[in-house]
Image (tube, rainbow, N blue to C red):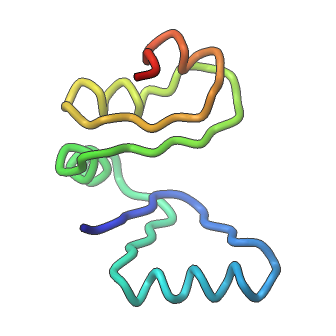
Amino acid sequence: FKVAVVGKVVPGSDKLGHHILEESKKQGLKIYDSLPYDQNIDLVSRSRFLVSLTTSDGASLSVLEAMAMGTVPILSDTAPNKEWVVHG
């Protein structure tokens, strides 16, 4: 079981948030501020799940690409996500 995060990770200014982040890195969490498109697609294609916790409106191309590759999306409850994914 491995976890990779692509994007800025801001655990908060509290000590607990930083402690959790540091301990997660010791357990194999990989954090990438950004990845070139081809590397990002490769990572998603090898993933079982894609977690997207966006709060903005608009359809996410990365979610659609992930679903096309058979990766299961775990998404925030936004109107655009409801158009593409049925709960259950």
Q: Is residue 63 above or below residue 12?
A: above
Left or right of residue 9: residue 17: right
Residue at 51% from the left image edge and 41% from the top image edge: 52
Q: Looking at the picture, tell me which residue is in the foreground, 60 or 22.
A: 22
Of all residues, the one furthest to the right in this rendering is 13
Extreme residue in the top direction: 83
Quadrant assignment, res 45: top left
**Left or right: 78, with 40 as reference point:** right
Name the residue rendered at 38%, 73% in the picture. Answer: 30
- The image shows residue 24 at horizontal and vertical percentages of 47, 81
- Horizontal side, residue 23 vs residue 10: left or right: left
Q: x, y (%) of residue 19? A: 63, 88
Residue 58 x, y percent position in the rendering = 62, 20
| Quadrant assignment for the N terminus | bottom left
Determine whether 61 is above or below 28 in the image.
above
Which residue is rendered at x = 54% and y = 15% of the image?
A: 82
Q: Is residue 15 above or below residue 17?
A: below
| Residue farthest front in this picture | 88
Quarter holding the C terminus? Answer: top left
Which of the pair 16/33 is nearer the observer? Answer: 16
- Residue drawn at the location 51% of the way across and 65% of the way down: 33
